[in-house]
Image (cartoon, rainbow, N blue to C red):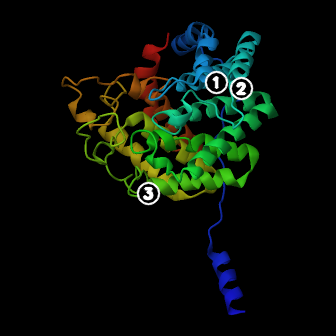
Amino acid sequence: MLHALFLVSICLVVPQDQPVKDVLRPADAEQLTGFIGARLDSAYRNRIMKQDIEKLAEPFATRTETSCWQSEFWGKWFTSAALAYRYKPSPELKTKLDQAVKLLLATQSNEGYIGNYKADKHLQAWDIWGRKYCLLGLLSYYDITKDKAVLTASTRIVDHLMSELTSQNAMIVRQGNHRGMAASSVLEPMVLLYTRTQNKKYLDFAKEIVRQWETSDGPQLISKSTTPVAGRFPKPTENWYGWEQGQKAYEMMSCYEGLLELYRITGDKTYLEAVVNTWEHIRDEEINIAGSGAAMEAWFGGNQYQTQYIKHYQETKSATPPLDGRYTIRRCYRNIVLQRVTRFDAGRRIGLGQVFAIVW
């Protein structure tokens, strides 16, 4: 009897997830004009519509990769194309989206794998990172079409990933590069998949990813959120782009975007506070007058050095649409939508100063 009462008392104090409602909502329709509208139209015509989608899908059919990141390209283009379609729907773009999804799904293995890595190299280097982008693309297509086959294909990708990690007794933060941030950035599509399927195993896996972040092997994105992003870990002495690199800007931003989505469905303010703390460090210590930051693809406290010569400074990995700037802006946007606060208004400087400067 006492044992039963003890179990009941535990159940009563276990915190329950409390989804957070957005304070604001996106506009139902909008057509931008002027300088910004012209830039977006140019990108629509010259980048989205002219992409060779067969070339993007080809690596998934051959699966010869051992170390590189070509598998991100399909998803990066597709998520941008899906946004472009929402902004300006056209039959031509819809056909292109349909064909791109068909080409990708044709490469899915019997086990559920969609990627370009050799079988004995699964989980290594950029393999999970590439799977993330495929998931983001497929889920954005599902949101447009409600095609159940695409949602099923997405669940098979994740089920296969979870199975591989379990069978190898592998921690996701020990896979790939940059203290596991590249691999564990799969958090975002994991949460998005949960919201579309309501299958709790995907939410449980998302929480497990965040738990692993805080282990000694993880990037400690929550506990180190009050630490300047340039000083969270020692600088790598051998391989700048290897696992030891804990200041890698792009991958860090991608992880925090997933953490915001997890906050949205759980209401755990620890997640939100980690994102806000990190953003304030980036805004105050990294972003320069032109709206960019990072060098050699990593945070380095660059705001104070912006008048000096810096190698590979404010390159595309820190401020352009498909890369870190996209994540910085999207993180600002999501925080504003969630909280209606102005501390994220610096996203406008990043957008105007960097993103539109390189849009075709």
Question: In the image, what residue type sits under mark 3?
Answer: Glu
Q: Nearer the viewer, residue 24 or 79?
A: 79
| Marks 3 & 1, CB-CB < 8 Å contact | no
270 w.r.t. 284: above or below: below
Q: Is residue 289 left or right of residue 113?
A: left
> In the picture provided, is 215 more to the left or to the right than 38?
left
Res 263 seen here: no
Decide: is 114 above or below 77: below
Q: Which residue is mark 3?
A: 214
- Residue drawn at x 65%, y 65% as measured from the top left: 16
Assign a secondary structure to mark 2: helix
Q: Verify CB contact (< 8 Å) between mark 2 and mark 1.
A: no
Indicate the quadrant where residue 92 lies. Answer: top right
Marks 2 and 1, Cα distance to the nearest angstrom?
A: 20 Å
x 46%, y 38%: residue? 182
x, y percent for residue 101 = 71, 22
Identify which residue, 287 or 336, lies in the foreground.
287
Disc on res. 83: 1
The image quadrant where one finds the N terminus is bottom right
Number of numbered discs on residues = 3
Sequence order check, earlier mark of 3 and 1: 1
Disc 2 from disc 3: Cα separation? 35 Å
Distance between mark 3 and mark 1 Cα atoms: 33 Å
| x and y percentages locating residue 83 in the rendered image | 64, 24
**Spot occupied by residue 179 in the image (x, y as percentages of width and height):** 39, 45
Residue drawn 45% across and 26% down? 68
The percent position of residue 297, horizontal first and vertical second, equals 35, 30
Question: Which disc, if any, is residue 105?
Answer: 2
Count residues near mark 2 (Cα–Cα under 10 Å), then give few for <14, some for 14-19, many for 20+. many
What residue is rendered at 39% in x and 36% in y? Answer: 249
Q: Secondary structure at mark 3?
A: loop
